[in-house]
Image (cartoon, rainbow, N blue to C red):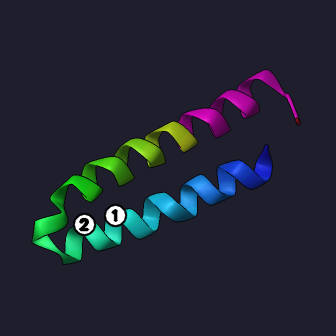
Amino acid sequence: MKILLGIAVVVAVLLLLAGALVKAAAALLWVGLVLLVLAALAILLRVVTGRSV
């Protein structure tokens, strides 16, 4: 589970950078933001519940 969250964060950051650098790929910016928010929520939920899957 930690590996998947790490991959999601890396992909989100890469998509954010690609979206910011290429105007034609503006949709990637939104996909990156959504992935980053989902990863942050998953990490926050794990911290709050105390789970270490």
Q: Where, quadrant-wise, is the N terminus in this rendering?
A: top right
- Determine if the magenta segment contains residue 39: no
Question: Would you say 51 lies left or right of 32 here?
Answer: right
Q: Where, quadrant-wise, is the C terminus in this rendering?
A: top right
Q: Residue at x 67, y 57 (%)?
A: 6
- Tell me the tag on residue 46: none
Q: Give the residue at the far front of this rendering.
A: 24
Residue 32, located in which quarter of the rendered image? bottom left
Q: Secondary structure at mark 2?
A: helix
Dots 1, 2 in contact, CB < 8 A: yes
Give residue 2's position: percent from left, percent from top.
Answer: 78, 49
Alpha-carbon neighbours of circle 2 within 10 Å: few (<14), some, or many (≥20)? some
- Image vertical order of residue 14 relative to residue 26, above or below: below
Q: Amino acid at mark 1?
A: Leu
Magenta residues, start to end: 40-52
Give residue 47's position: percent from left, percent from top.
Answer: 74, 33
The residue singled out by tag 2 in the image is 19
Question: Would you say 12 lies left or right of 50 here?
Answer: left
Q: Amino acid at mark 2?
A: Gly
Q: Main secondary structure of the magenta part?
A: helix
- Image vertical order of residue 15 relative to residue 27, above or below: below
Q: Residue at x 45, y 41 (%)?
A: 37
Give residue 24's position: percent from left, percent from top.
Answer: 11, 68
The residue singled out by tag 1 in the image is 16
